[in-house]
Image (cartoon, rainbow, N blue to C red):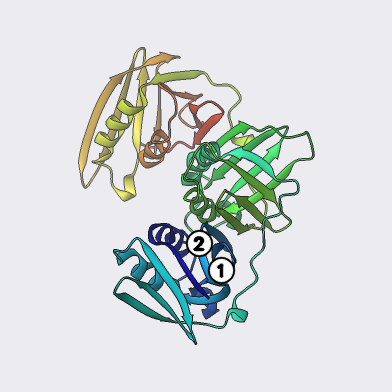
Amino acid sequence: MKLICDRERLREALTLVNGIIPTKSTRPAVENVCLVATNDALELIGTDTEVALRYRIDQIKVAEPGTILVPGRVCADFIRDLVGETVTVQQRGDKLELGSGPDRCELPTVDPDEYPVVAHFDQAGAIPIQGGQFNRLVNSTVFAAAKEQGRYAMHGILCLVEDQVLRLVATDGRRLAVASTPIDIPSGPPRRAIVPAKALNAFTRLVSDGLETISLHFGTNQLGLKTRRGEFFARLIEGEFPRYAAVIPKESNNRMEADPELLSKKLKLVSNVTTADARAVKLLLTKGKLEIFGRSTAAGSANSQLDVVYDGEDAQIAFNPDFLLEGLRNCERELVTLEFNDRTSPGKFTLGENYLYIVMPITVET
């Protein structure tokens, strides 16, 4: 292998691929980045056996094609700290030499045959969608996925294609985020996959141009996603995803509209006095006004209020403030809507067009 490429483009590619490569693995070969030089391009491949990425750099001056495995993080760190505009990459026996001007680095290599096979994207039956729109769906839901141990399926995001709509759903059992968008595809049978949340988070970093059309492919045991530069694959989570539609309230007696930014500030203010064992804020709604209360034995009490539009009888309901704040950070509307029936029923927050956030209430002393 011998080639010359732009240093900054190589740095960006190594950063993305190193986001996939594990620091420790039972298969030491996957702790490396796989470099594949062809006649006019350099492909970087990284995998942790659950998630894989192929990333392509074009307009490379390749003198000798080849495939090689080198330590990904050391390679990325050296390229990052070089000051030259171009980098020479050359294999010398069992070493890979990186250089720019007077600066040189030799890295040990690993036999490429030890590297697992990484699939190529299958364009047949792939679903096109605008990259920025897909990232919006991921960011609107991923925060609600389970993080602690429990039902394994809840650690993923349900990706569902049905009736020419792409819908993403995430839940940890105490809250639920559902976001969808219409897609321009022929009618067909539903397609569904439970994708690890960390995988979709990693994929959003590949979309540098929100207007770019990307592709999704639903495979038997993996989801493939393709951009102009990269191909990304995530092994699906097996299991039964919760029946999320049954959790969404169909009708509500009480309805509030509020400024999401101001509501966030008030919630954060009052939540300062709540503690880990008493993480709750109480919302008291009367005509035109919302009062927020919080208290704990260790930190004291606090309250605040703001003007809102409210349709309903005087009512109160309590929530974990962290859940509310995470949802409000992703609000896409000028006014956030909260609907609920009583203090024991779920709160339905409308955060955008085709974007709902359901939060279970907390029982607190009145």
SS under mark 1? strand
Amino acid type indicated by mark 1: Ala
The residue that label 1 is drawn on is 37
Please say if 80 is above or below 301. Answer: below
Which residue is found at the position 33% from the left and 28% from the top?
A: 261
**Closer to us: 76 or 233:** 76
The residue under the point 69% across, 39% down is 161
Residue 268 screen position, x and y as percent: 28, 36
Cβ–Cβ below 8 Å for labels 1 and 2?
Answer: yes
Q: Quarter of the image holding residue 45?
A: bottom right
Q: Residues within 10 Å of mark 2 (few under 14, many from 20)?
A: some
Which element type, helix, strand or loop, lies under badge 2? loop
Packing grade of label 1 (10 A; few <14, some 14-19, many >=20) is: many
Identify which residue, 27 or 238, lies in the foreground.
27
Give 173 or 326, whichever is nearer the viewer: 326
Residue 178 seen by the camera:
yes
Q: Say how many tags the image has.
A: 2
Q: Position of residue 145 (x, y in %)?
A: 51, 48
Q: Amino acid at mark 2?
A: Ile
| Mark 1 or mark 2: whose residue is earlier in sequence | 1
Residue 363 location (% of width, % of height): 42, 37
Which residue is depicted at the point 33% across and 49% down?
Answer: 277
The label on residue 144 is: none
The residue tagged 2 is 60
Question: Left of 161 or right of it: where is 107?
Answer: left
Could you tell me residue 130's position as x and y percent? 57, 37
Q: Where 304 falls versus 23 (above or below)?
A: above
Q: Is 67 or 223 nearer to us in this picture?
A: 67
